[in-house]
Amino acid sequence: MKESQIMLIQYLTGVLILVLGALHFLAISALAPTKDKVLYHYGTTGVHNLTNGTLYYYNVKKIYTSLAWGSVFELLLTFLVFHIFNGFRIILSEQFPGGRSEKIITYAMLIAALVVFVWGTRTIVLMLYGGGV
Amino acid sequence: MQEVALKGFGEVVKTVTLRIRRYDPESGEPPKYVEYKVPVQMGMTVLDGILYVKEHLDHTVSARYSCRMGICGSCGMIINGRERLACQTQILELGKDLVKIDPMGNYGTVKDLVPDLTKLFRNHESVKPYVIRDEEEPKGEYLQTPEQRESYAMFTDCIMCGLCLSACPTNATDELYLGPQALAQAFRYISDNRDLGLNERLNVLDSKHGVWRCHFSGACSDVCPKGVDPALGIQLLRQLLTSNVFVKFEQKGAPKGPDRKSVTGVS
Amino acid sequence: MTIENKKGWISWFNPFKYGTDRWMYSLHRLTGIALGLYLIAHVWETSNILNGPITWNKIMVDLDYPFGQHFGPLILSLILIAAAYHALNGIRLTIVENGLMLPRPYRPEYPYKAKSTRGLNDVLKIVLGILMIITAAIGIIYIYTGVIV
């Protein structure tokens, strides 16, 4: 692909991440399926209380099992993976310019991006199809 | 003729230390800093200071310079951490008792303060900095309105001092990057209405080390001693290239004026 | 013999002596790297939801208390500030790097202050800076108190 096309996608995914990222924050805060919207509970003992609050296991699971949120997360993951690993590719190829090293960087970033993408997709898809305990 | 009396002019105001980075290519030793004490007069520039050192203290200090008035662009160096022309920087204006002078970064150093500008000229050459036309032999002038000239005139002020490449953070690691100077010149020719060479330059500009490696840190425009604003040129060039992805950009080329023979009678 | 005098990657994070854009470039790069690494960790962290509540709770506690009680919210707040900065500066860069809201070529006049890094670009910086402070403040208040402003 031409560099101008790659960079256009970079800008576009950046804007989309902003929109979807905002939704993702809403998912864990304002629209969280719980009345207790606190992320971190500090008891008198100073122990993280995970029997309620937004990060309580069954609350997070509720978000994941909804198809709408699942699609939002999947899209967000796709755009983020492209944006981040293309960004890393740019930074690294500026550090190690040259035909051969850039080829290595490009393929390394492609593989790393695929691994992260597959790993994240696995979580989302398995949770949609009744994963988790 | 009445002489203008400048108060304090010619008097030694104070003594300033010039800390100059020395590198001797013959000994091959790593560069080291050497300090020189220089009496400073009003209006004395850093270049004057270096020349004072050369005349009175150490004849082996080397620097490039020519016009001493900010026209030739030879004496670019890093003065107190910032890229400046030595001939346009007054020592007293710096306001420091210690002036640290380094050769320009991101270039090789030939000796002391002399940078190896091969990269600058190679990059400049690679963007074809001349008007490209499709006809082989021009028959007459190409017409251009004053407004059309204004659209690129500021970029013609470039004196190729190379300060922008030294300030550019991308150039700090990426020696293949074209650099602000070459990209601004590419824009200067592409936006010239007489030019038809966009497609010929495209493979150099739209490459892995072309226009997209600029991240608009604005350092080039900040240090430019001529106010050329290369960063502006690069962003406008980028606008051209992004729109070129969707709609093929067409250069019409300036209309030809009357040819020479019909005006002067001689060919 | 000519020797190399490259400034090297360390100069990416040396914005002194230049203008505001140069600072924003350094911060954009730093926050970008940090957010990228955070995403990789975050994808791994959230994948533990498949392993049931016991592992999930253990991971949450381990990640929040490796260096004491307030590490979790602190790191989350920093990531939030970084994300707000990177996102809003990214919007600015998308605008100006495509030649929008920049001046057209002009006549340089002494003392040669570049107009591309000033003018409307400065207005954008201020607007996005205010937005960033608001976003970060809302987020941090939420992280620490659970109150959604």
Image: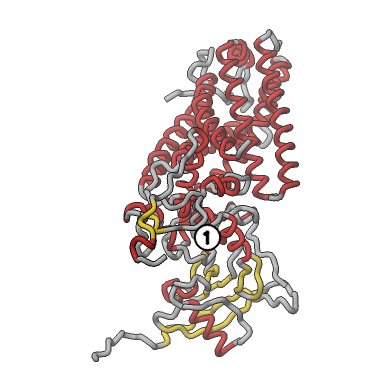
Residue B108 shown left or right of residue B156 in the figure? right
Q: At which x and y percent is residue B81?
A: 54, 65
User: How many callouts does the rendering have?
Assistant: 1
Residue B261 shown left or right of residue A64 in the figure? left
Subunit under mark 1: B
Q: Quadrant of the C terminus of chain C?
A: top left
Q: Quadrant of the N terminus of chain C?
A: bottom right
Q: Residue at x 42, y 73 (%)?
A: B93
Task: Give the residue number, with chain letter if any, for mark 1.
Answer: B164
Work out whether A66 lies above or below C115: above
Q: At which x and y percent is residue C94?
A: 48, 38
Residue B8 shown left or right of residue B172 in the figure? left
Work out whether C59 lies above or below B174: above
Work out whether B261 lies above or below C139: below
Q: At which x and y percent is residue C126?
A: 39, 43
Q: Residue at x 63, y 84 (%)?
A: B60
Q: At which x and y percent is residue A102?
A: 71, 44
